[in-house]
Image (cartoon, helix red, strand yellow):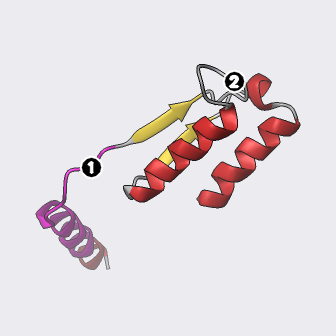
């Protein structure tokens, strides 16, 4: 039984290291805010960002600072990100 487990682990390791993989990029977006900055409202900025990510097939992780989203608008922002996956 131990030999079988060792062989299966060895085959799994070889399989992982022999697969060709494409380069990958990780995107994280930190501390979203519901404040207006520049010429765009937070909703316009957020919609543009989500649309650009979706259009280019990019998956991003959103790291939230609760004090910036702990209100009704923040719940809308978080729901939009959650709905997009």
On screen, residue 7 above or below 56 = below
Residue 85, label in figure: none
Q: Distance between the residues labelled 2 and 1?
A: 32 Å
| Position in image of residue 67 (x %, y %) | 78, 23
Q: Nearer the viewer, residue 14 or 58?
A: 58
Task: Tell me the SS state at disc 2.
Answer: loop
First of labels 2, 1 by sequence position? 1
State which mark lies toward you, 2 or 1: 2
Q: Which residue is drawn at 52% across and 42% down?
A: 49
- Say above or below: 32 vs 22: above
Q: Would you place residue 45 above or below residue 60 in this image?
A: above
Whether label 2 touches label 1, CB < 8 Å: no
Query: Along the line of sight, which residue is nearer the eye, 45 or 14?
Result: 45
State left or right for residue 42 relative to residue 72: left
Task: Answer few, some or many: residues within 10 Å of disc 1's Cα (few below 14, many 20 plus, some between 14 and 19).
Answer: few
For residue 77, side relative to residue 75 (left or right): left
Residue annotated with mark 2: 36
Tell which of 22 and 48 is nearer to you: 48
How many numbered markers are drawn?
Answer: 2
> Which residue appears at 54% of the width and 48% of the height?
50
Magenta segment, which residues?
A: 6-25
Provide the residue designation for mark 1.
24
Q: Quadrant of the N terminus?
A: bottom left
Residue 17 magenta-drawn?
A: yes
Tell me, yes or no, whether the highlighted magenta stretch contains residue 23: yes
State whether residue 77 is above or below residue 70.
below
Residue 46: x percent and y percent? 61, 40
Give me the residue at 11% from left, 65% from top.
18
């Amino acid at each position: 039984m131990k030999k079988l487990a060792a062989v299966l682990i060895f085959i799994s390791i070889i399989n992982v290291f022999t697969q060709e993989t494409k380069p990958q990029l990780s995107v994280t977006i930190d501390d979203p805010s519901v404040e207006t900055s520049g010429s765009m409202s937070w909703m316009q900025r957020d919609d543009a960002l989500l649309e650009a990510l979706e259009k280019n097939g990019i998956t991003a992780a959103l790291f939230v600072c609760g004090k910036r989203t702990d209100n009704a608008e923040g719940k809308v922002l978080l729901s939009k990100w959650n709905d997009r996956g």
